């Protein structure tokens, strides 16, 4: 009899938990950025199927398609009621429901959103960041590497080393179809150097000024 009482209590508790909405489950969970997809999924075990972003079949029944950006390896998981949208990165194997049960693939949790538009806007911002690189960042990386190699800043050898590494970074950016973004300090205006090969000589000359201090980002366009 005591055993049956505990069983009834467990079923009652489970019933209550299963009524949680997607946002309620998120608020009660301890999901961390970088968590695996399986770790995040475990938080929705007792969530209503229509509120669970991992119940892909329930969402398919509403006619909504799955979102997966194969190029940038980003996936959006969302529930049938469209109240929770989970963004996962590093997804090389997305959700696959061609057979039962669904395979949830891999990936790491990045962020939670509460509308599809908000999730897509965030994904677009991630994609843009991956497709561009700041010129200042490239210069600083080159300089730091040369310092590590033992070159003294302010010397001609240090400048030659930094320019050589910066030149290699330009080659890599061109190979990866990245846009080199130049942004003046204190300004929201940016210049995107799309054709790195055509602008190469001019860019290297100005980079030399940034390295030896004769030029700054504020005066970059006049160097």
Image (tube, rainbow, N blue to C red):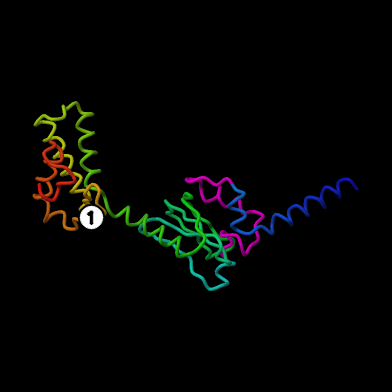
Q: Nearer the viewer, residue 197 or 205?
A: 205
Q: Is residue 113 left or right of residue 149?
A: right
Drawn side of residue 8 relative to residue 66, left or right: right
198 w.r.t. 213: above or below:
below
Q: Position of residue 68 (x, y in %)?
A: 43, 61
Name the spot of residue 183 as percent of width and height, x first. 23, 50
Is residue 18 covered in magenta?
no
Q: Nearer the viewer, residue 166 or 184?
A: 184
On screen, residue 60 versus residue 223, left or right, reads: right
Give the magenta-colored segment's residue range: 30-57
Residue at x 51% of width, y 70% of height = 64
Q: Residue at x 88, y 45 (%)?
A: 2
171 left or right of 29?
Answer: left
- Which residue is rendered at x = 42% and y = 54% of the image? 92
For disc 1, the marked residue is: 190
Provide the major secondary structure of the magenta segment. Answer: loop
Which element type, helix, strand or loop, lies under badge 1? strand
């Amino acid at each position: 009899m005591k055993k049956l009482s505990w069983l009834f209590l467990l079923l009652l508790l489970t019933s209550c938990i299963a009524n949680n909405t997607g946002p309620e489950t998120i608020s009660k969970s301890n999901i961390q950025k970088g968590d695996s997809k399986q770790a995040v999924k475990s938080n929705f075990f007792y969530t209503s199927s229509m509120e669970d972003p991992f119940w892909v079949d329930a969402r398919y029944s509403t006619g909504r398609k799955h979102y997966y950006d194969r190029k940038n390896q980003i996936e959006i998981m969302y529930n049938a009621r469209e109240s929770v949208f989970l963004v996962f990165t590093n997804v090389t194997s997305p959700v696959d429901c061609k057979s039962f049960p669904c395979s949830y693939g891999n990936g790491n949790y990045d962020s939670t959103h509460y509308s599809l538009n908000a999730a897509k806007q965030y994904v677009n911002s991630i994609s843009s960041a991956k497709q561009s690189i700041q010129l200042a960042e490239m210069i600083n990386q080159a300089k730091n590497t040369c310092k590590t190699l033992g070159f003294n800043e302010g010397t001609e050898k240090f400048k030659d080393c930094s320019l050589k590494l910066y030149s290699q970074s330009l080659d890599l950016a061109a190979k990866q179809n990245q846009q080199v973004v130049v942004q003046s300090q204190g300004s929201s205006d940016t210049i995107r150097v799309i054709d790195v090969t055509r602008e190469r000589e001019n860019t290297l000359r100005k980079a030399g000024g940034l390295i030896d201090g004769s030029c700054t980002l504020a005066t970059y366009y006049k160097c």
